[in-house]
């Protein structure tokens, strides 16, 4: 008999010897698995993998090995898809890693309203129906200086609501250099069309003057719109009117001034050596009618879109039918209220994790990186590096940091191994080195990073001496 024919017959025999799903699930090792579709799926996957291995020339697995494979696949299937990770990349507001981590008080507030009932839409004084918007209005007024405020589920929703409620069927004037696209293909011209408003571009990409806005105002104009270029920067021969000039023009011509601030900054970024970022309070003082900004970027809270400004304009937003479609849930409201309280108390740089990370002194970061080095069996050193703010905030701006540089032959492989840990550790590869930046690692996670580095050493061969 030809060798190929014997091999084919052996493979066929090995495949026939594999148990059925039902028989496999009766193995004693699998008796503790609950009788759910998940265990059936795990068994099917294990058998499919065994068939593929046999057809590739592998020996058929033993009954025990097959059962253990079912247990492994069951555990993998039972893992939540959304899991905590340790961010050692040095990117503070990391969009792919969930942006801003929440403060302890924000987490406690979410848990408190999640465990039972709450007064989400109940007025405790009147004993009657209330509004979920009431929980945030007073804090938004206090920290921004606005006459009124409200929040929706993200800043894209905030902008859409603002333009739909205030400008539908009319024109909105925007500088040509601010008709921008932000993350996920979200384009200002597209949002304007969706809102029912008509975009009128003025000026040029790099220079727009107050006279350009003035010349474009007609009886069809609803508003002037400033869009902060939060994820890119135009430098050199540039010009744009001051917000105060736009406010004066808007008042004189009877139109609204709207401001898309993006990142939601409430503090002076220059105190940390960063470029100036427009603050919400400054927009309100300059005279905008409505300012929109994010809750989960520089503000350091949960995903949210915040709208603050003149009481009459905010009232129109609250009354619009779209406001219900984009409203926040009780958990996000609780977290945002707790975050805003940090600002109201003046404790934001000690309580809000994003601001703590931005403000972290280099010597403190160096000490933490050195502790990791001492625990790491692989060749490593503490090096000067740069952290990024990220999240479409302060484009190109970095903060000096100290990172642990681990020298291994295959840094990309090492990074992949760290991502498979529990919890996953997300590092970055730079100049052929594996870098871990303590600026974005929460202090309570330091021991987990050290343990992951020790486990990494067991799986990798270092690339040579110190």
Image (cartoon, grey):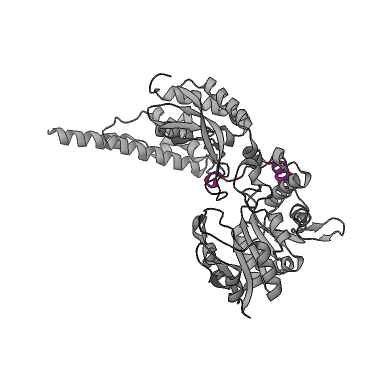
Whether residue 33 is visible to the viewer of this picture, yes or no, is no
Segment colored magenta: 93-118
**From this viewpoint, which residue is outermost toward the front?**
237
Who's the residue at 49% across and 40% down the image? Answer: 77
Asked whether residue 199 is drawn in magenta, I would say no
Whether residue 41 is visible to the viewer of this picture, yes or no, is yes
Report the quarter where the N terminus lies: top left
**Measured from the top left, where is residue 219 in percent x and y?**
63, 81
Report the quarter where the C terminus lies: top left
Who's the residue at 55% across and 51% down the image? Answer: 392
Give the left or right position of residue 389, taking residue 250 as reference.
left
**Measured from the top left, where is residue 190 in percent x and y?**
52, 67
Who's the residue at 55% across and 73% down the image? Answer: 200
Give the left or right position of residue 39, taking residue 117 as reference.
left
Asked whether residue 113 is drawn in magenta, I would say yes
**Measured from the top left, where is residue 429 in percent x and y?**
44, 35
Q: Is residue 203 above or below residue 141?
A: below
Q: Is residue 200 above or below residue 267?
A: below
**From this viewpoint, which residue is outermost toward the right?**
125
Between residue 1 and residue 97, name the one nearer to us. Answer: 97
Between residue 80 and residue 460, name the one nearer to us. Answer: 460
**From this viewpoint, which residue is outermost toward the bottom?**
219
**Measured from the top left, where is residue 381 in percent x and y?**
49, 24
Q: Is residue 457 above or below residue 427?
A: above
């Amino acid at each position: 008999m030809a060798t190929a024919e014997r091999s084919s017959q052996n493979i066929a025999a090995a495949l026939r010897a594999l148990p059925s799903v039902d028989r496999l699930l009766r193995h004693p090792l699998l008796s503790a698995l609950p009788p759910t579709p998940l265990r059936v799926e795990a068994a099917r996957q294990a058998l499919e993998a065994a068939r593929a291995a046999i057809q590739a020339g592998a020996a058929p697995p033993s009954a025990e090995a097959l059962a253990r494979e079912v247990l492994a696949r069951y555990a993998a299937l039972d893992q939540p898809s959304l899991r905590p990770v340790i961010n050692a990349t040095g990117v503070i507001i990391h969009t792919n890693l969930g942006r801003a981590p929440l403060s302890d008080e924000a987490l406690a507030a979410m848990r408190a309203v999640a465990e039972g009932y709450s007064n989400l839409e109940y007025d405790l004084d009147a004993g009657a129906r209330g509004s979920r918007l009431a929980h945030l209005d007073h804090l938004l007024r206090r920290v921004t200086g606005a006459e009124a405020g409200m929040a929706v589920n993200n800043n894209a929703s905030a902008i859409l609501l603002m333009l739909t409620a205030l400008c539908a069927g009319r024109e909105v004037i925007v500088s040509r250099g601010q008709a921008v696209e932000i993350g996920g293909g979200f384009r200002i011209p597209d949002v304007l069309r969706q809102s029912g408003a008509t975009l009128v571009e003025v000026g040029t990409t790099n220079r727009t003057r107050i006279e350009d806005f003035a010349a474009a105002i007609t009886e069809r104009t609803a508003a002037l719109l400033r869009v902060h270029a939060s994820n890119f920067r135009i430098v050199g021969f540039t010009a744009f009117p001051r917000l105060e000039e736009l406010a004066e023009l808007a008042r004189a011509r009877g139109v609204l001034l709207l401001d898309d601030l993006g990142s939601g900054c409430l503090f002076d970024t220059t105190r940390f050596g960063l470029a100036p970022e427009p603050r919400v309070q400054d927009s309100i003082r300059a005279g905008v009618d409505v300012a929109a900004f994010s809750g989960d970027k520089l503000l350091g809270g949960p995903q949210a879109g915040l709208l603050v400004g003149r009481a009459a304009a905010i009232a129109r937003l609250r009354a619009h039918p779209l406001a219900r479609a984009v409203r926040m849930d009780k958990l996000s409201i609780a977290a945002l209220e707790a975050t805003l309280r940090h600002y109201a108390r003046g404790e934001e740089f000690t309580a809000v994790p994003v601001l703590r990370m931005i403000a972290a002194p280099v010597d403190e970061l160096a000490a933490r990186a050195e502790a990791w080095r001492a625990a790491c069996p692989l060749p490593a050193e503490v090096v000067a590096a740069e952290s990024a703010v990220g999240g479409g905030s302060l484009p190109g701006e970095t903060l000096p940091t100290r990172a642990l540089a681990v020298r291994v032959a295959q840094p990309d492989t090492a990074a992949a191994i760290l991502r498979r840990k529990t919890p996953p550790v997300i590092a970055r590869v730079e100049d052929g080195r594996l870098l871990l930046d303590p600026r974005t690692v929460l202090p309570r996670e330091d021991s987990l990073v050290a343990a992951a580095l020790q486990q990494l050493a067991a799986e990798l061969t270092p690339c040579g001496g110190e």
